Amino acid sequence: MSRSKPITLDALRRYAVARTLFPPTTLQKAIARLGFVQADPIRAPARAQDLTLRHRVKGYRAGDLERRYQRLDVEEDCLVNYGFVPRSLLPLLHPRTARRAWDAATERRAAEVLAFVRARGATHPRDVQEVFDHGRVQSWGATNTLNASTALLDGMHYRGLLRVVRRESGTRVYAAVEHPPVDDDPAARHARARALLMRIVDKYAPLPSASLGYLAQLLQYGAPHLKGETRTLLAELRASLPQTKIDGITWLWTPGEDPASGRWRVDPERARLLAPFDPVVWDRRRFELLWGWAYKFEAYTPAAQRTMGHYALPLLLGDQAVGWGNVALVDKARLEAHLGFADRRWARDPALSCAVDGELSLMAEFLQLDRGAFSRLKRPRK
């Protein structure tokens, strides 16, 4: 019997990139395979969900997910963050019990709004605001406030009373929904928690053991009602998942996969600009362990303190993370890319330069521009 090759950091890098940057497929299949696509409202030059899907969906164009949402077996919902999940995941997430219960007055307002939405059908937040005067509530920060009806609708969606049926200019349009009851005995709860954790492992593998712990904590956002089961399962998975230790770090991955296998192939000449929340780069701890430098998401960092730029997109060449790019849409007609590099030698690499031009050409096409409508600079813009 032949023995498998030793699992090295190089093998883990190749495995991490190849397994999630799978050959492009349909939009439905890509979301099902990813299990969850994190959403973000910033467009730089497109929303994070679009930047994630463009590498994995044949012929994908910015905004396709929003345009085709109603025809997909997909829902906007919460897992470890807010985003898009296959509808098959909903029985694992609902009925969801929020960690903080509403007071009696909020319960009453929610019941009134739910009756209104049931009678009306698809409902825009402004429709609720025209009928109900809920005032304003404090949002993040000391001086920021939010329309109370909008906050209430968000809370009703989170609790599974409403679903997003579509978006209009980025605003959620809601409809009433009822999630079927689920078996709530201990064995069934354990099975649901395990299925969710394994979905996370499959999405972010290979991952350091500490990262699995962090993701298990974040899962309390999407499944707060399974908090106890998640804690119990964490120790179980850390002991039972396939694993290796490299330089004192325990790495875990999906059962049935061999990170050292030759099946994991990456085109060494292909450059990719990734969303800050792409599964390849989402785990900053893993990123630094695999590539030896720290990637920073600085969209909410004061401009004077930024080192990489407002919305730096990590730059891959094959399975190597070599730098980042801030890409802006200028006059709705041309891309301007400001590049930065983890090692200055990459700035003079002709193969990388050619690969980046190819990637920017594909990004222009993704934004429905002329494929040659781009220019690039070597200094990142703050």
Image (cartoon, rainbow, N blue to C red):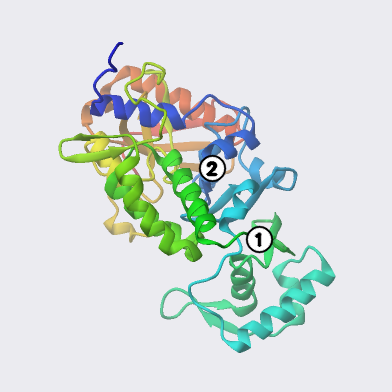
Question: Taking 42 as reference, is 240 left or right?
Answer: left
Rendering coords of residue 328 (x, y %) = 48, 43
Q: Residue furthest right?
A: 119
The x, y position of residue 199, in whole percent, is 48, 44
Q: Position of residue 342 (x, y in %)?
A: 25, 35
Q: Report the label total.
A: 2
Compare residues 323 and 176 and report the one nearer the observer. 176
Foreground pick, 242 / 134: 242
Residue shown at 58% from the left, 48% from the top = 85
Q: Of the residues shown, which amino acid type is indicated by label 2? A: Gly
Q: Residues within 10 Å of mark 2 (few under 14, many from 20)?
A: many
Q: Going by the picture, which residue comes out furthest to the bottom?
A: 105
Q: Quadrant of residue 240?
A: top left
Three-letter code, disc 1:
Thr
| Residue on which the image places disc 2 | 35
User: Counting residues from the N terminus, which is met first, the one under dot 1 or under dot 2?
Assistant: 2
Above or below — where is 247 with respect to 282?
Answer: above
Residue pointed to by mark 1: 171
